[in-house]
Image (tube, grey):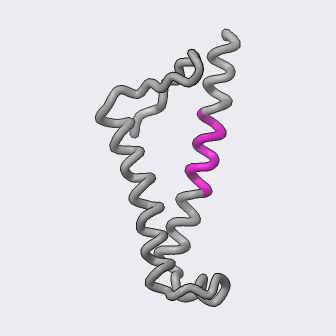
Amino acid sequence: MTASKVASLTVMAGVTFWFGNIFVLGAGLTFHASAISAINHLYPFLNMLMGVLVLGTILSYLVWVTIRRRHISIKGFRLELPGLA
């Protein structure tokens, strides 16, 4: 296995980890908005709106990698993004 493949797998594992954390944050804000409002002192509607925006962002990313070309180049390093499947 080449060093670029190892780096690609490492980056994708990190990205997947953070997308999972962000999904849990969005789901918590959306479905438990009133409980979280006791912590962050925002209106439950604002918490729900932020959660829907976070989940919408993740959904749009999943649609993007499913429909469009799944390669990204950063400083000459080409990274292939996994599709929805």
> In terms of depth relative to the viewer, which is nearer, 22 or 74?
74
Instruction: From the top left corner, tell me how far across and down residue 23 is, in percent.
Output: 53, 59
Q: Name the residue: 56% across, 85% down.
A: 42
Q: Quadrant of the C terminus?
A: top left
Q: Quadrant of the N terminus?
A: top right
What secondary structure prevails in the magenta region? helix
- 29 within the magenta span: no
The answer to which quarter of the image holds residue 11 is top right
Relative to 61, say whether 53 is above or below: below
Query: Which residue is farthest top?
Result: 2
Instruction: From the top left corner, tell me how far across and down residue 35 is, in percent.
Output: 59, 87
Q: Name the residue: 58% across, 43% down.
A: 16
Relative to 80, say whether 53 is above or below: below
Residue 85 appears in view = no
Residue 34 appears in view = yes
Instruction: From the top left corner, tell me how far across and down residue 19 is, in percent.
Output: 56, 50
Query: Which residue is farthest front?
Result: 75
Q: Does 9 sit left or right of 69 as displayed?
A: right
From which residue to which does the magenta span run? 12-21
Q: Does 73 sit left or right of 1 as displayed?
A: left
Relative to 18, say whether 44 is above or below: below
Instruction: From the top left corner, tell me how far across and down residue 34 is, in percent.
Output: 53, 88
Query: Which residue is farthest left?
Result: 67
Q: Does 28 sit left or right of 82 as displayed?
A: right
Q: Name the residue: 62% across, 49% down.
A: 18
Relative to 82, say whether 43 is above or below: below
Count of numbered circles in the view: 0
